[in-house]
Every structure is written in C-alpha cells, then in structure tokens.
Image (tube, rainbow, N blue to C red):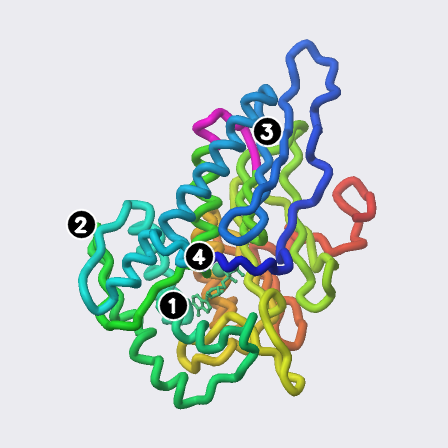
Amino acid sequence: MFTGVASRTPVFLIAAVVGAGCTHLSPVAAPVVVKRAQLHMGTLVSITAVASTSDRANGAINAGFAEIKRLEQLLSTWIPESELSSVNASAGKAPVHVSPETVAVVRRSLQVAEMTGGAFNIAIGPAVDAWNVIEAQRIPPNDELEALKARISLGGVHLDEQARTIYLERAGMRIDVGGIGKGYAADQAVATMEKAGAIAGVVALSGDIKAFGQLPGGKKFPVGIQHPRREGEVLLFIDLQDEAISTAGDYERYFDHEGVRYHHILDPATLQPARGCQSVSVIAKDGVWADGLDTGIFVMGPARGMELVERLDDVEAVIVDHEGHVHISSGLVHRVRFPNEPDEKGRPQ
Ligand code: ADP
Ligand code: MG
C-alpha cells in the first residue's frame, strides 16, 4: 500500500479557507483556521484545523500528522518492519500478534469484502504485482494469473480478534490495505485533532477526506470531485460536514495498450482491471467505510454498486460508469452542485 508514486488527486478541498475569521472585530476572538501539508503514506496529506487560537490549531494539526505517521509505521507494506509486513513475511508459517489498530483495519476490510460480495479483497496484492501497472506496463498471461488465485483467496486470511493475531495460511499470500487504509487514517487523525482541542477541521490524504464541524461563520467544507477524463476539471461539488468522502478512479495509475486502459483496481474474480466504472466517490460517516467501499463498488460496477449504496444507511455515492454517465445516489442528488451552476447565494462556482 501507499506507493511512492504521485497520483492525480481525485477529490480536492476548495481553497480559500485559510485565514477565514481572522479579521473579525468582535470582543470575543473569532476562531482561527490553519492549514498545513506534509508527505505521508506516499501521498500529500493536508490538514486544516479550526480552533480558538493559532497555537491550538497548530497543536491539533501536529497531533493529526503524528497519528498518520504512527499508523503508517503499523500498516505500510513498504516499511519492512511494519506489522503488516511481519504478517506477510510469516505467511504459511505462523500467526503474528498485532496492535488493536491493525486488527481494526483488517476487520473492517473483511467486513467490506463481505458487503461487496468479495469485490473488495485485501489479499489481491500478488495479482496487483503481476500487473505492476506503474513500472512494467505488461499484460500478464492468463495462466500466470490463474496460478495466483489460491494465494488471493480471502478464506486464507485468519483474523483472531481475541488473541489479536493475523495468520495467512499459504506461503506467498499477503495482505495490503492500500484500498482502505487512508480512509482509516483520516478517521484516526480527526479523533486525535478533536482531543487536541480543534473545534472543526479537515484531514485530506489525497482523495480520502474527512471533515468535522464547520468553518467560522457556519460554512461547511466544500470539496470538488475530479472529472475522470478531464484532468484538472471538477465533475461536481459537495459540502461535507461530519462525514468522509473517498474516490477510486481508473485515471490515477494506468497504462494504455492498443486503445485499452489497464489500471490498478483489479476484479478478484478475473484478476483483470475492473471495467464497469471510470470513478466511484463514496460519502460515509467514517473514512474507513468510504475508502473500502469506493474500491469495492468500483469493482462491482455501476448497477450492483448503486444497489448496494441505496441499501446502506448513511452511505451515498457518485459513480461515473465506463461510458462517462454520472449516477448519483438518491440521498445525494440535492446536495451536489455542478461547475458553472450558481451556488446558494447565486454566485457562479
Ligand atoms: P488510492 O487512494 O491509493 O487510489 P484506492 O482506494 O483507489 O486507493 O485503492 C486502490 C488500491 O487498492 C490499489 O493500489 C491496490 O493496492 C488495491 N486494490 C486493487 N484492487 C483491489 C480490490 N479488488 N480490493 C481491494 N484492494 C484492491
Ligand atoms: Mg478505496
């Protein structure tokens, strides 16, 4: 997970929140807004904090970054000493004792796998490697993919929550939480910021964004979803409050061969890049659900994916199908704004 490859940001915060509230002349000091960015988990992480003083806002931001760094040390498969790297190194040999956080991410991953009928699969790493879309740009032959199937079966992942161990039953298996870990990290960072005294804020790990509270003046945090085929263009805007958004797209890591796009989200049933969608954005209360579900729904495709979204409470989605048609879930239709549409005050976006 957490590759060092810079990818296009699929969801982004709308700028111009920094400094809001600083010019009020009221006797009670207005809250301040501070925003800072650092590189973590192979991506640009930006944190915005609203607090009573800039010291407090900066303290909350520091706490948020520290939490993300701590989780990266546990979960990144790019770090040989991480807990997940130990689990993978012990595949076929022995269970590995892990922290409550690692148990939590793997438990959620297995839950999303169940919800999506196996479309989300944290054991798919060996197939992702066989494709290696960033560097190798090769199409692995079918027999090579077939031979990997036993190693990517989720039935071989044994999580013992009581003992706090994870055991992968076959040599060569491995788990990778690249499709869900950034959402989990956003949740944890937000909890840490609240403890550190932030009254509102946003944590954005590239396209995995979680917002809490409101900006000074009662404005919600606006985000734009990237258009999957027009680089730098916004598909639509949504205001977030106490919720998370996450986007999975076929335009982040891919190569083209003879007019076909080969990208990094694989269908566990075929081990081929999933073909139903160009992008899937999921909104949920928690980042861990939004992130896990965006990848799973991307694999399920627009029809089955939207059916699942409509069945789940507090989960909404924007799905761009493979033809570029935009599908918006029923609870979100009235909350989205398209570019050039006037905002609630009649101003153009
Ligand atoms: P990112 O924010 O890095 O783009 P996504 O949420 O879009 O992450 O998930 C993409 C990553 O998930 C891939 O890089 C790969 O490691 C992993 N992945 C690919 N296919 C699947 C799948 N079917 N289930 C779970 N994870 C997957
Ligand atoms: Mg995801």
Q: Which mark is residue 121?
A: 1
- Report the amino acid beneath label 4: Ile
Q: Is residue 183 visible?
A: yes
Helix, strand or loop at disc 2?
loop
Q: Earlier in the sequence, mark 3 or mark 1?
A: 3
Q: In whole angstroms, how far apart are the C-alphas of marks 4 and 1?
A: 10 Å
- Tag 2–tag 4 contact (CB < 8 Å): no
- At x 57% / y 35%, what residue is drawn? 201
Q: Residues within 10 Å of mark 2 (few under 14, many from 20)?
A: few
Cβ at disc 1 under 8 Å from ligand 1: yes
Q: Nearer the viewer, residue 22 or 280?
A: 22
Helix, strand or loop at disc 4?
loop
Q: Which residue is mark 3?
A: 50
Q: Which mark is residue 180?
A: 4
Q: Earlier in the sequence, mark 4 or mark 3?
A: 3
**Residue lying at the far top of the rendered structure:** 27
- Tag 4–tag 1 contact (CB < 8 Å): no
The residue stretch that appears in magenta: 193-201
Cβ at disc 2 under 8 Å from ligand 1: no
Q: Position of residue 217 (x, y in %)?
A: 67, 28
Helix, strand or loop at disc 3?
strand
Q: Which residue is mark 2?
A: 162
Q: In whole angstroms, how far apart are the C-alphas of marks 2 and 1?
A: 23 Å
- Report the amino acid beneath label 1: Asn
- Report the amino acid beneath label 3: Val
